[in-house]
Amino acid sequence: GSSDGPVLPRYVRVNTLKTSMDDVITYFKRQGYTYLGKARSIQELIDFGQKSGKLFLQDLHIPNLLVFPPSTDFHKDSLYTAGHLILQDKASCLPALLLDPPVGACVIDACAAPGNKTSQLAAIVQNKGKVFAFDLDTKRLATMSTLLLRAGVTCQELANVDFLTVDPSEPKYHKVSHLLVDPSCSGSGIPDQMRVLTDEAGSEKEARLQALSAFQRRALSHALQFPSAQHVVYSTCSVHQQENEDVVKDVLEQHPDFRLVNVLPSWPMRGLNTFPGSECCLRASLSDTLTNGFFVALFQRRSPEEKRIS
Ligand code: SAM
């Protein structure tokens, strides 16, 4: 990072399939860390990002998320290797948290590898019910199996397939009520990839964004076809309107049975004002929310009463 602007802290998600927030806080205190309690504002997090040493906070928005100074590295920590801790950026914890399937629910993670969000979904449903997870990439799916094993996830069913070819009318998906769609994107919200994109020639970049956003529309639209879908969350780690608000706007127009949920009203950064209701979506960035660049929209099926009125 630069010397003046905010610096991304090290976020650590506590895996409640294997441990508890209290046990992890006790562990770090025994390791000589000072616990500063729960953050009260984004400004407090921004100030914390400038610190170093053995300190930590509980996050302001995400339950089970701890915040450490940027220089902290847990890749060799025994709690990490034992699957008690998941190293996941704060913004990428939002989709599963906002989808919030009930314990025992049937869930689909449409583009799932390497599986951080799948493991979070499994923790939310408490390993009961089912998480169907799909990915096209064999290697990434293999990495995902290792990650889920380490995280103690047992309710998953992985498949190496194109999500667009998964048939929503298949009986095994009849009970799927919650879907998470986190498709391939430009990654322009991740600092290093930003550089790759800006180095690309304008026309190449345009073509790539167009191809990505076409796939994103199809994937999100496909998720809304599942007969029992009540909630569908869409996310990207892109900062481009074409991959975010534009996708949501088009898909909403194609699916009048669904509406957007106004997620986390206290979150300061909202969707770009490009269509009525875009403020229901949320965005994230290093300067505004001390996270990677990110976008989330939550769709909810309209109730039968709501349809009669409109
Ligand atoms: N949700 C993952 C996590 O939190 O760890 C990250 C997903 S990554 C942004 C997008 C994934 O979509 C990639 O692993 C890619 O292989 C997969 N993918 C791309 N096209 C797909 C398709 N048609 N069907 C299923 N997965 C696909």
Image (cartoon, rainbow, N blue to C red):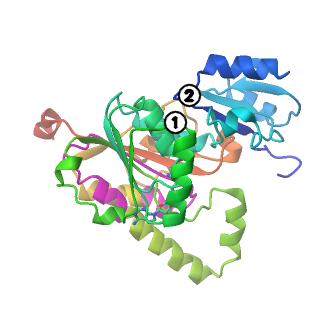
**Residue beneath label 1, please?**
152
Give the numbered dot on residue 18: 2
Q: Is mark 2 within 8 Å of ligand 1?
A: no
Question: Which residue is at 81% across, 38% downward?
Answer: 72
Give the x, y percent position of residue 274. Answer: 44, 55
Residue at image location 22% in from the left, 51% down from the top: 256
Measure the C-alpha gap from mark 2 to mark 1: 7 Å
> On the image, which quarter does residue 231 sit in?
top left
Instruction: Please provide the residue range marked out in magenta.
Output: 218-246
Circle 1 SS class? loop
Residue 71: image quadrant is top right
304 vs 199, left or right, is left
Other residues around mark 2 within 10 Å, as few (<14) / some (14–19) / many (≥20): some
- Labels 2 and 1: the sequence-earlier one: 2
- Three-letter code for the amino acid on which mark 1 is drawn: Gly
Residue depicted at x 22% and y 55%: 168
Residue 233 in the magenta stretch? The answer is yes
Magenta stretch encompasses residue 18:
no
- Amino acid on which the number 2 mark rests in the picture: Lys
SS of the residue at dot 2? loop
Q: Position of residue 44 (x, y in %)?
A: 75, 27
